[in-house]
Structures are given as structure tokens and as C-alpha cells.
């Protein structure tokens, strides 16, 4: 019985992880006024981020602390390492009233979808 329970929990965890990693199916157009937000840690950002992305560390509380400063009428593209934090950030932003927010998933998927280079 414990093995069955362990296997079931592992399957649920895997499916949740895969959902968080989903990348946009279509290429994403980045306009001049589009705001790209990287919600990873500062060290992850320094290791490589999309060209022009702003760093708002989700886990460190920087995104939450900056929520009132974000333009409610702007277009936002959000990414992280795997898609987990970006999906949390997108929900947080939507709850704050931001309506044009796209979850790009992980940084590699974000680079592929937008065509933007990863810079250090």
C-alpha cells in the first residue's frame, strides 16, 4: 500500500511540474512597450536573462512589493526557470488587476517564444 501511495503522489507531482513548464504554443510578439519580467533570484538573473528583462524576484518578495508600481494598462511577459514561479507571478499579477499578462514558462521557452537572446 505505501508503494502505491508513493507512486500516486509521484505521478501527481510530475503532472503538476509538467503543467508549470508548458511554453506558449505560438510565437509571442514583443512590442517596444512590452515589459518583460524575470521572477527568478538575482543570481539566476545574473547567470542569464532575456535581453531587456527586468528582475523582480518572486520568492524574495520583490514582485509583491512592487505590485502597486506596475502599470495596469501595460503588456507583461513573465518567465522564470521552469514555469513554476512564473505561473505564480501571473496569478498574483492578475489578482492585482493587471489584465495583459502572459506566462512564458521557463527562460529557454521564453527565449524561443519571443526570439530574444539570453544575455549575461
Image (cartoon, grey):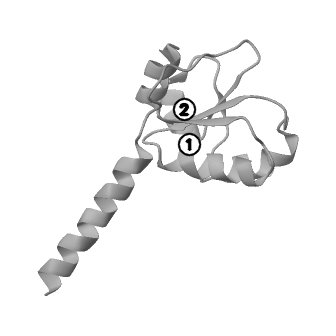
**Vertically, is 65 above or below 29?**
below
* Point 53% across, 29% down: residue: 46
* Point 67% across, 40% down: residue: 56
Specify the farthest residue to the front. Answer: 26
Helix, strand or loop under label 1: loop
Specify the farthest residue to the bottom. Answer: 1
**Vertically, is 75 above or below 89?**
above
The image shows a total of numbered marks equal to 2
Q: Is residue 56 found left or right of 84 in the rendered image?
A: right
Helix, strand or loop under label 2: helix
Label drawn at residue 45:
2
| Residue 35, quarter of picture | top right
Q: CA distance from mark 2 to mark 1?
A: 6 Å
* Point 84% across, 38% down: residue: 72
- Pointer 1 residue: 41
Locate residue 120, reporting x and y percent: 51, 19
Q: Dot 2, crowdedness within 10 Å: few (<14), some or many (≥20)?
A: many
Locate residue 16, reporting x and y percent: 38, 57
Q: Is residue 47 found left or right of 3 in the rendered image?
A: right
Q: From the viewer's side, name the closer residue of 66 and 15.
A: 15
Rendered-image quadrant of the N terminus: bottom left
Amino acid at each position: 500500500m505505501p508503494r502505491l501511495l508513493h507512486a500516486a503522489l509521484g505521478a501527481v507531482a510530475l503532472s503538476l511540474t509538467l503543467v508549470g513548464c508548458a511554453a506558449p504554443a505560438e510565437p509571442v510578439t514583443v512590442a517596444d512597450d512590452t515589459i518583460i519580467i524575470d521572477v527568478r533570484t538575482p543570481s539566476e538573473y545574473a547567470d542569464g536573462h532575456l535581453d531587456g528583462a527586468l528582475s523582480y524576484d518572486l520568492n524574495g518578495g520583490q514582485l509583491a512589493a512592487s505590485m502597486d508600481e506596475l502599470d495596469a494598462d501595460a503588456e507583461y511577459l513573465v518567465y522564470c526557470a521552469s514555469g513554476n514561479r512564473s505561473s505564480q507571478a501571473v496569478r498574483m499579477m492578475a489578482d492585482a488587476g493587471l489584465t495583459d499578462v502572459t506566462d512564458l514558462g521557463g527562460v529557454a521557452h521564453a527565449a524561443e517564444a519571443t526570439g530574444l537572446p539570453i544575455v549575461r
